[in-house]
Structure formats: C-alpha cells, structure tokens
C-alpha cells in the first residue's frame, strides 16, 4: 500500500471515528489478516495432532495401552482446535468485522493455551512412565 | 460519530497469531522431549534420556504459559493504546533451550567416549 493512500485513509479515519491504528475496519476481502489468523489456528491444531501421532507411535512401540489412550485424548484435543476453535474464531472475526465491533475473544486464547498445557502434561506422563 | 472503543482489529489478530506461534513453539519443544524419550532411551548416563525429555517438555510448557502471559499483557496495551511492553519470555526460553543443548552435548559426549 502506498504511503499516500495511507495518509489519505488515516485522515478519513480521523473524520469517521473508525478504530485507531490506520485503515478503516473493512469486512474480509481487502485484508489478509483474518485469513492468516485462521491458518495460524489450523497450524496449531495440526501441531497438536502431529504430537498425538508421535505419542501414539511411542505407545504402540512400547506396548502401553494406557499411553495409547492418552495419545487418543491428545488427538481429540487437536481435532477440537482444528475443527472447533478455528472455525468458531473465523465466524467471530467475520461477524465482528461486519458489525464494526472489536474482534477480541479472550476466552478462545485461554482455551487454546489450556489445550497446549494439557497436551504438555500428557506428554510429561508419557515421558516419565516406565518403558 | 463517537470515537471507537475498540482497537484496530489487525492489532488484535496479530497479537493472537503471536500467541498461537508461541503455543506451536511450545508444542515443538514438547514433541522434541517425547522424541528424545522414544528414540534415544539411552543417553550418556542412566537417567540422561529421561532428564532431557522432561526438561524439553517443561520448557515447552513454559513457552506456552509465557506466550499466554505475554499475549494478555500485549492485549491490555493494545486496548489502552500504549506501546507493547518489553518481552521477557523470549530470553528465558532461549536460555532454557541453550541449557538443554549443553546438557545434551555433554551426554552425547559421554555416550560417544564410552569405552
């Protein structure tokens, strides 16, 4: 985006009372930010799934059914991020942009952090269990 | 029109992606710990593999929690239109990973030099 365009837009913003920062909030189509954010959520879910695969492989190699169940639980958490939190977040961002309200949903950040902490706890149990 | 009571959505989303990047960094460290326990069960000394694995998993846990704390502080700064606070999580993470690497190097040395 050219500097001239930006200046022009920030003047516009000052008049219209749009959110501070720079360009006015527009529904998706002009900005790649919502898309990048969704991809980031999906990568995080895929990361949890990859870790579940690693835990499952280790459990099968060691013949540990309990740890295999734990790996299954981790996989469900990964699917939850990929198929639950990510689409929920997309819709929340789209709605907020359409209405012109703030896009922050602090609870989702807490939930996804809790997922990763739980996954780390499961990995700790797997690593410490006798093999 | 009244001034907006919420920040530019791009700041909020950028901060969110930073949190998710921290979480993925944590996941990668956790996966590294699991991989050490699985693929290098004997490393230098009897407890070597387990110690490195636990250290990596705990570092990953710390990255996730630290990333969340940082996200929350950034979020407050963005809402208040203040500059972002300085980050302390990254130096801590780098120190932890470097310490683990030193331990791994020593253990690999012990393993290689074992008669």
Image: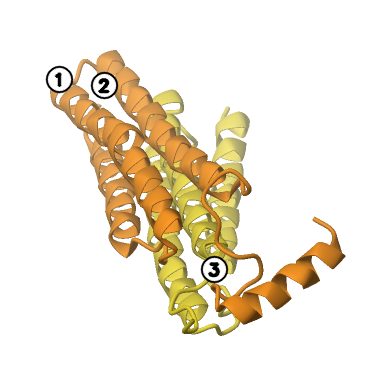
Q: Is residue A109 left or right of residue A6?
A: left
Numbered disc 2: secondary structure? helix
User: What separation in Å lies between label 2 and label 1 (alpha carbons)?
Assistant: 7 Å
Image-quadrant location for residue B94: bottom right
**Which numbered dot is residue B89?**
none
Task: Report in which chain the residue with disc 3 lies.
Answer: B
Q: In the rendered image, which residue does mark 2 sit on? A: A59
Q: Position of residue A76 (x, y in %)?
A: 23, 30
The answer to whether residue A37 of the structure is visible from this angle is yes
Q: Residue furthest left?
A: A66
User: What separation in Å lies between label 3 and label 2 (alpha carbons)?
Assistant: 46 Å
The image shows residue B70, relative to residue A49, as above or below, that is: below
Q: Position of residue A110 (x, y in %)?
A: 30, 59
Residue in the foreground of this view, choosing between A6 and B65: A6
Residue in the foreground of this view, choosing between B4 and A16: A16
Q: Position of residue A2 (x, y in %)?
A: 85, 59
Task: Report in which chain the residue with disc 1 lies.
Answer: A
Q: In the rendered image, which residue does mark 1 sit on? A: A65
The residue shown at (65%, 65%) is A23
Q: Quadrant of the C terminus of chain A?
A: top left
């Amino acid at each position: 985006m050219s500097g001239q365009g930006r200046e022009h837009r920030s003047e516009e913003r000052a008049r219209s009372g749009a959110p501070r920062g720079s360009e006015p909030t527009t529904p998706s189509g002009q900005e790649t930010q919502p898309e990048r954010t969704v991809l980031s959520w999906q990568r995080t879910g895929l990361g949890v799934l990859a870790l579940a695969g690693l835990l499952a492989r280790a459990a099968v190699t060691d013949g540990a059914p309990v740890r295999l169940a734990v790996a299954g639980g981790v996989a469900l958490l990964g699917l939850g991020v990929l198929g639950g939190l990510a689409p929920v977040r997309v819709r929340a961002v789209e709605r907020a942009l359409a209405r012109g309200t703030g896009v922050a949903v602090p609870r989702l950040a807490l939930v996804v952090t809790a997922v990763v902490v739980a996954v780390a706890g499961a990995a700790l149990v797997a690593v410490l269990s006798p093999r | 029109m009244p001034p907006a009571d919420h920040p530019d959505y791009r700041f909020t989303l950028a901060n969110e992606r930073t949190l998710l990047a921290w979480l993925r960094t944590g996941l990668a460290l956790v996966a590294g710990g699991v991989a050490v326990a699985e693929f290098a069960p004997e490393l230098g000394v009897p407890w070597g593999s387990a110690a490195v694995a636990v250290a990596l998993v705990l570092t990953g846990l710390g990255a996730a929690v630290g990333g969340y704390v940082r996200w929350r502080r950034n979020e407050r700064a963005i809402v208040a239109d203040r500059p972002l606070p300085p980050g302390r999580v990254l130096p801590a993470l780098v120190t932890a990973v470097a310490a683990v690497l030193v331990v791994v190097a020593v253990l690999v040395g012990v393993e290689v030099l074992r008669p």
